Each structure stands twice: as structure tokens, then as C-alpha cells.
Image (cartoon, rainbow, N blue to C red):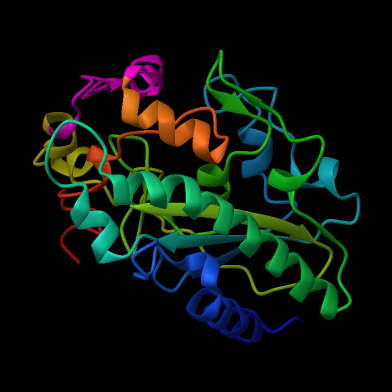
């Protein structure tokens, strides 16, 4: 059995020391990561192929790596500086946009670092988000490998009304994952279902993300992904940031900050 603590320590050191995890001001983009593990043959990955979840576009672990044993997921929580910068106004803050674009560049570095550490353990590794077969379909707002759904499978948290994943360090951040033939002890999922950590689904006591959403995309009966996707595309400063970093889109992130699930599980 491979050592998860060894992997966690290595990831912590990388996140703490790599210069990619810095805003232009020198402030960290991300705090230390969470790490979770799922069995590659977990039936949940077959469930993800159902139309009611992700759909047939989703590729289960064994389609990425024939000898897949474990799926590893991690969460990089945004630092308090990044989160709080985005509290006010209808548009994303500059720090939030840097966190989205520079932060995702750093996330890709973390993915490659994770792959290298697993190879040092003599494991075979595939990182779907960096693989040539990775596909994101923005017409239908789905992909053949969803980092949030992988994080749920790996026991890192559960979904909220805004469809973000609420972890023990909240929902504001970025996710990444890898598939390996190494065996790690599995992280158990909570028994309360896919929305356990969201107060709205518990007793409808919280609708803060609905009120925070400037596009009106978040509703109590679902989320309008098209409205969310299109909201920041028309804004000039967001467009310039996208062009600068080469990304197709951003989200304003208002539903992830100044909410009870920003940096923790509500009520815990």
C-alpha cells in the first residue's frame, strides 16, 4: 500500500514553496491542499455516465488507464486574501481573476508534480485534465472528466445549491486529480448523500448563494449554467484577463465567497 501521508507532505511542500502559487503582490493564491482517494472500480464512476448526472461523455478511470487502481483527488482552497477581495460588487475582483487564471496555471503544475511523485513510487499515472483525450463541451457544459465529481467520489465533500463542492475547507478553490495503478487507502464518502454539506438541502435555511449570484443563474430548483457561463464574457476587464492568460471563460465566483460554505462546512 502506498503512503498517503508521504504524498500529502510532498504536495504541502510544493504548494508552500513554488513561486507559481503567488499573486503579483506576493500573497499566496492557495492554502494547503486536501487530498482524497477513491477506488478506480467504484460503481459511482458508472453512475456518472447516466444522463441525469454527467452523461455518456464521461470516461471512467479504466478508460484512461487500463490498470487503474486508485483515483486521487485534491482541493486547493483559495487564500483568505483572494476570497475576501471578491466580496463586493457584481464583477469579479482582479485578485479573484488572477486566482482563476494564474491559479489554474499553478493547478496544472500541481497536477504534473503529483504525477511525478506517483511515478517516483513506481506507479503508472494518467492525469486526465492534461491528457490529449480530455474534452470539455461548453455547448452542453459537460466534460469527459469532471474534477468536482471526482472530488465527491474521493470523499472530499458534497455539492451545494450553486453546484460547487463544499469541502472541510469550503468551496472556494480549484480541484485536480490523477489516476494510478498504485493502491492507496480509500477515503470514505459521507453517508448523507451528494448534498449533505449544504444547509439548503438540509432544511432550506440558507439561500445566500442565490442572493449573491449577480446573473440570476442560481435558483432553488437548479442552476442555469448558460447564464453563469455567459455573465462575465461580456465584461471588458474579464475579457482582457481571459485573453492575457489564454482561457476561454471565467466565473465571477460570488457564490463561493461571503457565504457560509466559503471556507468550511456550515455548522461544523
Residue 211 falls left or right of residue 225: left
State whether residue 225 is above or below residue 242. Answer: above
Q: Is residue 38 visible?
A: no
- Find out whether residue 222 is within the magenta segment: yes
Which residue appears at 42% of the width and 58% of the height? 190
* Residue 189 percent across, percent down from the top left: 48, 59
Magenta stretch: give its range: 212-234
Most foreground residue, 70 or 192? 70
The residue shown at (83%, 79%) is 120
**Residue 13 percent across, percent down from the top left:** 55, 83
Q: Quadrant of the C terminus?
A: bottom left
Can you say which quadrant of the picture contains the N terminus?
bottom right
Depth order, front residue of 56/255: 255
Residue 140 picture location, percent across and down? 55, 15
Question: From what the image shows, is residue 154 above or below residue 10?
Answer: above
Residue 169 left/right relative to 64: left
- Reply above or below: 1 against 74: below
Where residue 133 sits, quadrant-wise, is top right
Q: Residue at x 39, y 61 (%)?
A: 24
The image quarter containing residue 168 is bottom left
Q: Is residue 46 magenta?
A: no
Residue 106 is left or right of residue 256, and the answer is: right
- Where residue 185 appears, as percent x and y from the top left, is 65, 74
Residue 89 appears in the picture as rendered: yes
Residue at 49% across, 52% down: 102
Amino acid at each position: 500500500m502506498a503512503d498517503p501521508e508521504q504524498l500529502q507532505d510532498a504536495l504541502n511542500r510544493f504548494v508552500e514553496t513554488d513561486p507559481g502559487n503567488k499573486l503579483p503582490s506576493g500573497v499566496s493564491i492557495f492554502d494547503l491542499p486536501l487530498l482524497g482517494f477513491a477506488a478506480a472500480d467504484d460503481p459511482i464512476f458508472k453512475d456518472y455516465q447516466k444522463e441525469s448526472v454527467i452523461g455518456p461523455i464521461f470516461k471512467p478511470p479504466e478508460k484512461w488507464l487500463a490498470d487503474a487502481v486508485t483515483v486521487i483527488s485534491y482541493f486547493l482552497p483559495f487564500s483568505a486574501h483572494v476570497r475576501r477581495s471578491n466580496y463586493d460588487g457584481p464583477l469579479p475582483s482582479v485578485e479573484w481573476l488572477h486566482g482563476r487564471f494564474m491559479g489554474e496555471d499553478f493547478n496544472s503544475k500541481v497536477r504534473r508534480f503529483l504525477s511525478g511523485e506517483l511515478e517516483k513510487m513506481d506507479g503508472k499515472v494518467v492525469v486526465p485534465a492534461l491528457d490529449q483525450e480530455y474534452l470539455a463541451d461548453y455547448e452542453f457544459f459537460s466534460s469527459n472528466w469532471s474534477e468536482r465529481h471526482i472530488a465527491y467520489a474521493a470523499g472530499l465533500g458534497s455539492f451545494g445549491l450553486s453546484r460547487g463542492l463544499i469541502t472541510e475547507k469550503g468551496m472556494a478553490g480549484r480541484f485536480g486529480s490523477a489516476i494510478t495503478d498504485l493502491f492507496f487507502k480509500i477515503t470514505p464518502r459521507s453517508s448523507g448523500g451528494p448534498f449533505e454539506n449544504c444547509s439548503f438541502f438540509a432544511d432550506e435555511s440558507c439561500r445566500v448563494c442565490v442572493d449573491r449570484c449577480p446573473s440570476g443563474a442560481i435558483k432553488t430548483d437548479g442552476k442555469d449554467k448558460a447564464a453563469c457561463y455567459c455573465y462575465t464574457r461580456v465584461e471588458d476587464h474579464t475579457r482582457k484577463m481571459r485573453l492575457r492568460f489564454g482561457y476561454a471563460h471565467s466565473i465571477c465566483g460570488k457564490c463561493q465567497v461571503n457565504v457560509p460554505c466559503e471556507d468550511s462546512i456550515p455548522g461544523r
